[in-house]
Amino acid sequence: MDLHIDDFYRDAALGLVNLYQAFPRKITLYLDDLVGILPRDEVGLPHPRQLQCLSTLLWLANEGYVRYESTIGYDAVDQIELTRKGFIRLSSTQHPFSQGLEHLPPSVFRVQGSLVQQIRQHLRAQNSEALIQVMQHFFSVE
């Protein structure tokens, strides 16, 4: 089993949700807030899990979902924000996970049926398989 891929989806989801909550502001996204405070190794290098999280955020930028100005060592990504592409995908209600919610009033459906809301629900429930399905959909939409 490729646990690092599960971690990738979780890190991407957490990062995107944090950025959506701050949108349209740029923020400093601290890796400790996403993966917890992890000890450095004996020579002072960051924990591998923290490096993996940083790599996930940089990958999101390379793929056009977020943009940032710089990193703060291995501790944070500074002045990071969602791109138009990232915002549109997260706020979309045009996905299979919103089925069954169409009966809601339009304003409630727009919020409850959004992809970011689906991500939040699975993060809260710690349902990694459902979260992975939603994140795979997020990355597959063109």
Image (tube, rainbow, N blue to C red):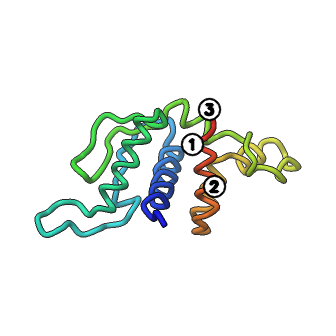
Q: Is residue 65 above or below residue 137?
A: above
The residue at the point 62 percent across, 32 percent down is 142
Across and down, in percent, residue 122 comes to 62, 62
Task: Say whether residue 81 is left or right of residue 138.
Answer: left
Residue identified by numbered label 3:
142
Residues at circles 1 and 2 in contact by the CB criterion of under 8 Å = no
Q: Is residue 66 above or below residue 125?
A: above
Q: Secondary structure at mark 2?
A: helix
Residue identified by numbered label 1:
139
Q: Is residue 85 above or below residue 73?
A: above
The residue at the point 63 percent across, 46 percent down is 137
Measured in 3D between alpha carbons, the distance from the residue under mark 3 to the one under mark 2, in whole angstroms, is 16 Å
Residue 107 appears in which quarter of the rendering?
top right
The residue at the point 61 percent across, 41 percent down is 140
Measured in 3D between alpha carbons, the distance from the residue under mark 1 to the one under mark 3, in whole angstroms, is 8 Å
Residue identified by numbered label 2:
133
Q: Secondary structure at mark 1?
A: helix
Q: Nearer the viewer, residue 49 or 119?
A: 49
Measured in 3D between alpha carbons, the distance from the residue under mark 1 to the one under mark 2, in whole angstroms, is 10 Å
For marks 3 and 2 on the same chain, the one whose residue lies earlier in the sequence: 2
- Amino acid identity at mark 2: Gln
